[in-house]
Amino acid sequence: MPLSEQEQRLLDEMERSLYHADADDVATVGRRVRASYTAIALAIVAGVVGLALLIVGVVVQQPLVGVLGFGVMFVGAMLGFAPPRRLTVPRDARDAAPRRPGLMDQINERWEQQRRDED
């Protein structure tokens, strides 16, 4: 059953807004960064030092040392999961090779090809 003109216009408008929203999402994803090796190394060192302080605090029965160790471990975890901006590397610097088309690119290409074949 063919679509009426109003339904076709509505479908076209929805398609345009979807492409616009996808373009905004792609632009946002491109700005993400990843942690540098320095941030990862600092996070691991802080985690190990914090764990050692926590164990020492338990062994010598000093709660202050144990709490300090937990705090150092927590800071290490935060540094590993969300490093400060000065310890990050843009994804573009890592991705020097050309990008292969993804699943959504292939689906969009097929959709466009079907639209061209119908016209």
Image (tube, helix red, strand yellow):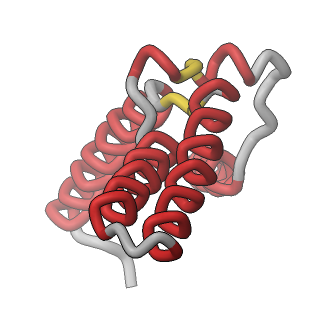
Query: What percent of the width, then of the height, locates residue 43?
Result: 56, 42
Query: What percent of the width, then of the height, locates residue 72?
Result: 41, 49
Question: What is the residue that sits farthest to the left in this orientation?
Answer: 6
Query: What percent of the width, then of the height, locates residue 82?
Result: 42, 42
Q: How many marks?
A: 0
Question: What is the residue that sits farthest to the right in this orientation?
Answer: 97
In this rendering, the answer to whether 41 lies above or below 96 is below
Quadrant for residue 71, please give it. Answer: bottom left
In this rendering, the answer to whether 47 lies above or below 100 is below
Nearer to us in this view, 77 or 60: 60
Quadrant for residue 98, please give it. Answer: top right
Question: What is the residue that sits farthest to the front in this orientation?
Answer: 60
Residue 36 left/right relative to 77: right
**What residue do we see at 38% from left, 65% from top?**
66
Nearer to us in this view, 103 or 80: 80
**What residue do we see at 42% from left, 56% from top?**
69
Nearer to us in this view, 22 or 76: 76
Query: What percent of the width, then of the height, locates residue 26?
Result: 45, 36
Residue 12 left/right relative to 119: left
In this rendering, the answer to whether 2 lies above or below 115 is below
Residue 91 left/right relative to 65: right
**What residue do we see at 21% from left, 54% from top?**
9
Residue 25 left/right relative to 105: left
**What residue do we see at 39% from left, 85% from top?**
1
